[in-house]
Amino acid sequence: MTTPLLELRNVSRRFGGLSAVKNVSFAIGKGEILFLIGPNGAGKTTVFNLVSGFLHPDEGSIHLEGRDISGVAPHEAARLGIGRTFQLVKPLSGLTVRENVMLGAFMHTASAGRAAAEAGEILTFLQMEHLAAQPARGLPLAVLKRLELARALATRPKLILLDEIVSGLTSGEAVTLAGLIQRLPERGVSAVGGVEHVMQVVMKIAHRVVVLDYGVKIAEGKPADVVRLPAVIEAYLGPKYRELAQ
Amino acid sequence: MSSMRGWKPWAFAAAVLACGSLALVARNDYVLQVLFRIVLFAGLGLAWNLVGGFAGQLSLGHAAFFGAGAYGFALLSAASIPRWVALFLAAVVAAAFAGIIGRIVFRLRGPYFTLATIAFAEVLRLSVTNLKLTGGAIGLSTPALFSGRSLWGMLYLSAIALAVTAFVINVYVARSRFGYYLMAIREDEETASAVGIDTASYKLRSLLISAVLTALGGALYGSAFQFIVPDSVLTIDISLQMAIVTMLGGAGTLYGPVVGAILLLGAAEVFKNQFQESHLLVYGILIVLVVLFLPEGVVGGLQRRFGGR
């Protein structure tokens, strides 16, 4: 078996007495799109923070292409090829859209000209080149979400973590964004997304999903199979519906 | 980003020459002293701008570097090191201070960072006040860098040289990856680290450059008055003035600190003659007005209003 791009092995993380993530293992291969699904508080954001170095696991380990990256700092994780977006969008509001994306491109070049060219290419890929000169301040949420994606892509990541990337968008906007995420493997980028709800739009683009509930992995598999699992239905709808599912 | 292409370098050179030629025109030492202060604080504001403006780290402890420069210069000169060598060695001493202080205070954020910078500067002031080596509260005499009748003219020109150096560094920062990284840190440290920026290291680098420039300003100041005491070069007033000059003009802009220094020190000078001590009141009113109506400073506010950045 080839080494997976990213692998979590029995990862746990506690906050005080609360286990935010408990003994979670999963792996993602090159060119794969995987979504973490789970209700609010299931531990998705904690997983993203663990993988991107913002938190470190209490137990277990995280491996990127076989290398243990459990204790690296966030900027080191980024340099190793892990890009991320934030659930609450964080544009550099004083800068333009292009400049925001240049910030990611600066990881590979010290030249502002080359960074601008690379930013332009990514903005074109994400169909937002017409907004390049706009200040990031005051842009609508759908654009800001895409800007988060653009900035992360500009670092040329191997893996991109998309925390709640479609939440807060209208269904039309979500479909557009999902279409763009679906094209990430073309660029050699794998993606781990996170969503609260088992959304149609996600089911279409995810190759695989991992379902979390109270920090525990309760299911993993192809989207169409996972939504039929009794444990998943119970997590979302309560024990009453478990029997209905069977 | 303000560009320096086309006519701008010429305009810049002309402005510097015009300022410099004032040294020849103004034969009056009082006028030269006022000009020296304004230009010195423009340079200091530009130095502070790197940390407080671009990187957004509100330091109120820059008096530590100013004082380290002044005291370093005085002590090294007393140890019979040539004056101009002592001047630059003093800047190295200040950079060493900045290295130590920065490693500690940059672990803190927001108001805690600001309080820690004040605390460090105060610790240094109290140490210097109580050490024999530094002459205690009585202070030290500082050698003059220049002599003769054109003393103030030469000091004024030195202040211009410092301000121009600081300005050129600001221009470079505003256009380079280094500057973008500092602005990213100012806007959001988490986002900055998510795009691979080692935030601690970049904040420290900006502080080192800022400290060196500030120390050169301190040494120049000490040499101008030929005597320093803790309460003249290590007082929080210095830290506050550096911050206020920059924020008044526009933190994170290129021209802000220069405009701020002209406004604040110019106004202080005018009103000092009219109202004696109550010029501090004018200071206060000026600051309140800017905070209320131009929170991004004079230059920042104007740029916002008339487009461009």
Image: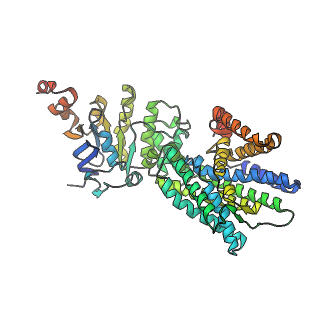
Residue ID at (70%, 71%): B77
Camera-side residue of B76 and B8: B76
Camera-side residue of B281 and B126: B126
Residue ID at (62%, 44%): B251
* Location of residue A54 in the rendering, given as x and y in whole percent from the top left corner: 37, 48
Q: Is residue B87 visible?
A: no
Residue ID at (27%, 48%): A29
Q: Quadrant of residue A133?
A: top right
Placement of the N terminus of chain B among the 4 image quadrants: top right
- Tell me which colouring the rendered structure shows: rainbow
Placement of the C terminus of chain B among the 4 image quadrants: top right
* Location of residue B107 in the rendering, given as x and y in whole percent from the top left corner: 46, 52
* Location of residue B97 in the rendering, given as x and y in whole percent from the top left corner: 56, 62
Camera-side residue of B275 and A86: B275
Q: Is residue A4 left or right of residue B98?
A: left
* Location of residue B127 in the rendering, given as x and y in whole percent from the top left corner: 59, 61
Residue ID at (39%, 47%): A83
Camera-side residue of B200 and A24: B200
Q: Is residue B207 left or right of residue A223?
A: right
As drawn, the residue found furthest toward the bottom would be: B80
Q: Is residue B173 left or right of residue A11?
A: right
A16 w.r.t. A235: above or below = below
Q: Is residue B25 visible?
A: yes
Q: Give the tally of numbered discs.
A: 0
